[in-house]
Image (spheres, rainbow, N blue to C red):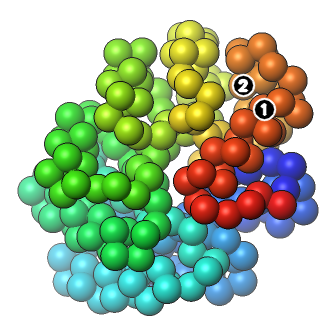
C-alpha cells in the first residue's frame, strides 16, 4: 500500500491504494476487500435497527471488516437526537466487543460525542471523518483522544490549512468520502501544508494505520 483512504463510498480497486470503503448493512457488497460497516444517522429506520445491528456484528467477526461506521450524531437532520444517541451507543458497544476502531459522522454534536466516549469509557480508536471545523474544536478532539480525518474540506476550504498544520502527525488520516477528486490530490495538498514529502507523509499515515487498525499497511 502506497496510499490509505480512510473513508470512501467509491471502490476504485486501485492497487496503490488501500481503500476503507463505507458499507451499509442492507446494501452489502461481498466483493469489496476492506470496509467499515455501520448505521449512518441519516439512515436510521426504527423497524430495521435490530436486524442491521445483527448484520454489523456478523461482519465485525471477519478480518476484512476494519472498523465500525460511519456512525454518529447529526443535529441537522429530523431524526431525534435521542434516537441517534441510542443507535450510536449500540454500535460503540459492538466496537468495544470486537475491538474495532470507529469512524464517526459528526455534525454540530462534538460535545455530545465527546461526552458519550467518556460515559461509555470507549478505549478503541475513534476517528472523526470529514473534519471541517476550527482549531479549537480540533484541539479539544485531539486532547480527548480522537483521531481526525481530512479530505473534501481540506481541498475546498483554505481556512483549514492552519487547523491541519497544527494536528499532531500521529493523529490524522486522509480520505475522499464522496468527492470526485482523487486521493493523491488530497495527499499532495496535505504534504504541502505539512511541509513534508509525499514519501514522508506516506510513512506518517502508514504508522497511524498500524497503530489504529493493528495491521501492517503493506
Expressed as whole percent of the image width and height from the top left, the position of residue 155 reads 66, 25
Q: Is residue 28 left or right of residue 52?
A: right
Q: Residue at x 46, y 60 (%)?
A: 101
Disc 1 is placed on an element classified as helix
The residue that mark 1 highlights is: 201
Q: Residue at x 44, y 89 (%)?
A: 58
Q: Residue at x 67, y 71 (%)?
A: 34
Quadrant position of residue 95? bottom left
Point out which mark residue 110 bears: none
Name the one closer to the observer, 124 or 149.
Answer: 124
Name the one closer to the observer, 40 or 169.
Answer: 169
Expressed as whole percent of the image width and height from the top left, the position of residue 113 reads 25, 44
Quadrant position of residue 8? bottom right
Decide: few, some or many residues near mark 2? Use Cα within 10 Å; few <14, some 14-19, many ≥20: many
In the image, residue 40 above or below residue 61: above
Mark 1 vs 2: CB contact within 8 A:
yes
Name the one closer to the observer, 209 or 8.
Answer: 209
Expressed as whole percent of the image width and height from the top left, the position of residue 19 reads 71, 59
Foreground mark, 1 or 2, reads 1
Expressed as whole percent of the image width and height from the top left, the position of residue 110 reads 27, 35
Name the one closer to the observer, 154 or 191.
Answer: 191
Q: Residue at x 14, y 51 (%)?
A: 119
Q: Earlier in the sequence, mark 1 or mark 2?
A: 2
In the image, residue 81 above or below residue 189: below
The residue that mark 2 highlights is: 190
Q: Is residue 75 visible?
A: no
Amino acid at each position: 500500500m502506497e496510499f490509505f483512504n480512510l473513508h470512501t463510498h467509491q471502490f476504485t480497486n486501485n492497487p496503490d491504494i488501500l481503500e476503507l470503503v463505507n458499507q451499509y448493512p442492507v446494501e452489502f457488497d461481498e466483493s469489496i476487500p476492506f470496509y467499515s460497516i455501520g448505521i449512518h444517522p441519516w439512515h436510521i429506520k426504527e423497524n430495521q435497527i435490530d436486524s442491521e445491528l445483527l448484520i454489523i456484528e456478523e461482519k465485525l467477526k471477519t478480518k476484512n471488516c476494519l472498523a465500525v461506521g460511519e456512525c454518529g450524531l447529526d443535529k441537522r437532520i429530523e431524526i431525534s437526537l435521542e434516537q441517534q444517541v441510542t443507535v450510536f451507543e449500540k454500535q460503540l458497544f459492538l466496537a468495544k466487543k470486537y475491538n474495532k476502531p470507529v469512524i464517526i459522522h459528526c455534525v454540530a454534536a462534538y460535545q455530545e460525542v465527546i461526552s458519550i466516549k467518556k460515559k461509555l469509557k470507549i478505549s478503541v480508536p475513534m476517528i472523526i471523518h470529514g473534519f471541517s471545523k476550527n482549531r479549537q474544536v480540533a484541539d479539544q478532539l485531539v486532547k480527548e483522544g480522537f483521531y481526525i480525518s481530512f479530505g473534501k474540506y481540506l481541498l475546498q476550504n483554505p481556512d483549514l490549512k492552519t487547523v491541519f498544520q497544527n494536528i499532531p502527525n500521529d493523529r490524522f488520516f486522509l480520505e475522499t468520502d464522496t468527492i470526485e477528486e482523487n486521493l493523491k490530490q488530497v495527499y499532495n495538498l496535505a504534504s504541502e501544508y505539512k511541509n513534508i514529502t509525499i514519501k514522508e507523509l506516506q510513512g506518517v499515515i502508514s504508522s497511524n494505520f498500524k497503530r489504529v487498525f493493528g495491521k501492517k499497511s503493506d
